[in-house]
Image: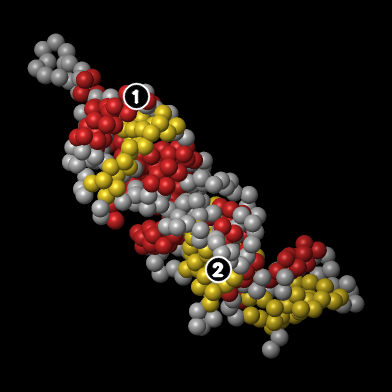
Amino acid sequence: MELFDRLQRQELERAVLVHVDFQNEADREELDEFYELVDSAGAEICTLLTTKRHHPDPKYFVGKGKAEEIKQSVSAYEADVVIINHALSPAQERNISELTGCQVLDRVGLILDIFAQRARSHEGKLQVELAQLKRMATRLVKGWTHLDRQGGIGARGPGETQLETDRRLVQGRIKQLEAKIEKVRKQRDLGRRSRKRSELPTITIVGYTNAGKSTLFNHMTAAGVYAEDRLFATLDSTLRRVHLPGAGPVIFADTVGFIRHIPHDLVTAFRSTLEETSEASLLIHLVDSADIHREEKIADVYEVIEEVGATDVPQLVVFNKIDLLEPAVEPKIDYDDNGVAQRVWVSAQNDLGIELLMDAVGSFFKGIYHEVELVLDVTAGKKRAQLYELGTILYEGFDESGNSLFTMKLTDHEWQMIKAWPELIRAKLIE
């Protein structure tokens, strides 16, 4: 980590922001989202410079005149960093930095900085460091040539430059991190295979960052996951087992939020986490219903879903934050012509519509039910409590020996699990 600590940029402080309004819609970035990203990173905004262009300038991205204006703003505000709301090439980043004498950060670097601040788990920290180092490896060129070490007596040229040493050390650290992440990935695969063997469906919550995924996850699972009204408030995926009445036990998974033009290195680094999406039984696609750009963000999420190979996974679209809509919308479920739930309208913050959502999710997993008769040993108090947790008891009584008699309606998974209990005196299907 010594190399990484030495090369890592300073903490963001006073920032000059630069935003370019491109004519091509595909090249544009949202200004409001830019402000949110900078706020999430913890920078103090000195000023915002904007310009319009048809195409990026090859040397400075923004053009010579605007680059000079950036230089003047850096000097006037004594800024620590220039943040540009677009992806820059290594050469463009270096040219602006040399012109302004200030550190330059593009949109990708800004997102990586936020990820570095928010990662809490061991796996998350490894993934973020790997993405940062891969990006850093492309930006070492000419950054350290003033530190050339001359050869010893008789040497006919410079020895190994600091640049070459840094590049070699960065590549070595990348290999170490990739090996560690692969080990974590195998451990995650073991857990995923275990869930498949137990036939537990997995419901993964996906959506644009700050759509309210962690808040919804907490209401559905009582998980207590950290949630805040900021971009990328949580990065680390969380799994919780929940019993859905009428559908049985399932696993809910919370994932990292998506964003437009998500850095490819991040998608690669977070592969093991995003595999929870591609391996899910159902995706809850959470949408901020009050966002004026919600249709574009829905498209951005679909793009990431396609990139991680999850297009074949069934989806339930959930429109969150209905309390912020005008006119107001009541919690409801929209069904298609076949009676299948397509959209659910909720407010996770105000706990509105959560029961409707749980019913809609459960409807995807209602399979064949079995009506069964059970006789449970009088000493099996814990197992009796577990039957109550299933919530499908049709009748309960006691025989002359004090053993518990139950008539229950169970899913196939529940029936296979319960009939193997050694505490059962008798378990039979009712024809």
Kindly report the distance in space between the C-alpha atoms of the residues bearing marks 2 and 1. Answer: 51 Å
In what quadrant of the picture does the C terminus appear? bottom right
Q: Which residue sits at x=56%, y=64%?
A: 327
Count neighbours of disc 1 (C-alpha within 10 A) and say few if under 14, some if 14 to 19, many if 20 or more: few
Count neighbours of disc 2 (C-alpha within 10 A) and say few if under 14, some if 14 to 19, many if 20 or more: many
Q: Quadrant of residue 348?
A: bottom right
Q: Is residue 380 above or below residue 189?
A: below
Q: Residue furthest right?
A: 400
Q: Which residue is mark 2?
A: 344
Label 2 is placed on what type of residue?
Val
Q: Which residue sits at x=57%, y=47%?
A: 227
Q: Which residue is mark 1?
A: 76
Q: Is residue 143 above or below residue 300?
A: above
Mark 2 or 1 closer to N-term? Answer: 1
Residue 180 rendering spot, x and y as whole percentages: 41, 42
In the structure shown, which secondary structural element does the residue marked by tag 1 occupy? helix
Q: Which residue sits at x=45%, y=55%?
A: 208
Closer mark to the observer between disc 2 and disc 1: 1
In what quadrant of the picture does the N terminus appear? top left
Looking at the image, which is closer to me, 252 or 423? 252
Q: Is residue 350 above or below residue 359?
A: above
- In this rendering, would 336 be left or right of 171? right
Q: Residue furthest front?
A: 327
- In this rendering, would 259 be left or right of 150? right
In the structure shown, which secondary structural element does the residue marked by tag 2 occupy? strand
Residue 365 visible in the current orientation = no
Label 1 is placed on what type of residue?
Ala
- In this rendering, would 366 be left or right of 338? right
Residue 2 rendering spot, x and y as whole percentages: 38, 26
Looking at the image, which is closer to me, 271 or 172? 271
